[in-house]
Image (cartoon, rainbow, N blue to C red):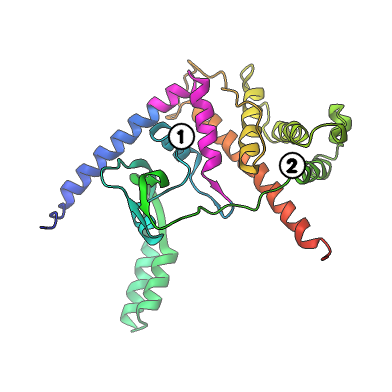
Amino acid sequence: MPRKPKMTDEERRAYSAKMRGELEAVMDRAYGAMVASEEFWTTVMRTAAKLTHPDRDDRSPANCIAVAAQCPHATHVLSSGDWRKAGRFPVKGSTSIRIWTPIKRRSEDAQDAAAAAADSGQGEAANGAAEGEGRKVSGFKAGPVFDISQTDGDAYEPPAAAPLAAEVIRDVLVSQYRDQYHEDPEQAGGFDFTQEAPGNAVRILLYGHAWRRITEADAPLPGQHAAEVASAAHVAALILGVGPGPAVMPPLAGIITQDKKPPVHESAVRVIETGRAIAHAVATSAERRRELAPAG
């Protein structure tokens, strides 16, 4: 079978511009849906939780929005090259999901270092080190990825954290609340968490942590702060494997600013990053407790 001819530089630039334009259109439609549909806002929050893994936040909040708009059932997305490294490959006929991927260019210092290494005969190691250290993000382009549901091949289990019991999450959240905010959450909220079902206690505590982390100055519109807090708690609960409370769409429809991105973009970024930070802090603290627990 004859190989597909390589694109010229001009064709490559035209193709890249076309893909970028299509992704920008996807984002515009997604932003419109996020202030008009509670269901789609919740889909974005659910996608962000699913694309959060113990070793990393798999995709940025903006890319979580992009993935939710194109493949709302996605759970784990990788490039075709990364899937092949894992022994899987995109199924023939699958339509890729477009996300923002960084464009990395070598700085002038890195280019000088590479040239000096070559001149001094230092070999490929020095050249490679200079290249790795000197590459900086100069922009973003639309890159293709595929969800695991679009692939076939070897069995593959995405990285997953060890499950935490709701009682453990509750105790960690209570301890963190006291340490970070110097308040007792039961006294502050009038709760007796020993009398609450563990999952319900966790939901209350997650809401309290999100309330503390997201300020009303960041979400000033009437109802916006409470909506973002509820959604951040929703994301954190999903990541931690606890039944979540509702994700509430912030009241941002019709708001116009001078920024290139609409206010709902910053709102979603704040919510996702807050939910991830709360869940990460819980998982880290629970793991530390596990390490310190006496054996036997």
Residue marked by disc 1: 65
14 or 162: nearer the eye? Answer: 162
Residue 213, x across and y down, in percent = 69, 36
Q: Nearer the viewer, mark 2 or mark 1?
A: 2
Identified at 77% across, 46% down, the residue is: 168
| Chain part drawn in magenta | 29-53
Looking at the image, residue 209 sits to the left or right of residue 105; the answer is: right
Q: Quadrant of residue 120?
A: bottom left
Q: Which mark is residue 166?
A: 2
Distance from disc 2 to disc 1, alpha carbons, whole Å, reads 29 Å
As helix, strand or loop, the secondary structure at mark 2 comes to helix
Nearest to N terminus: mark 2 or mark 1: 1
32 or 241: nearer the eye? Answer: 241
Q: Is residue 274 visible to us here?
A: no
Give the position of the C terminus as an image quadrant.
bottom right
As helix, strand or loop, the secondary structure at mark 1 comes to helix
Residue 117, x across and y down, in percent = 36, 78
Identified at 20% across, 42% down, the residue is: 14
Tell me which amino acid carries mark 2.
Ala
Residue 144, x across and y down, in percent = 33, 46
Identified at 29% across, 34% down, the residue is: 21
255 or 93: nearer the eye? Answer: 93
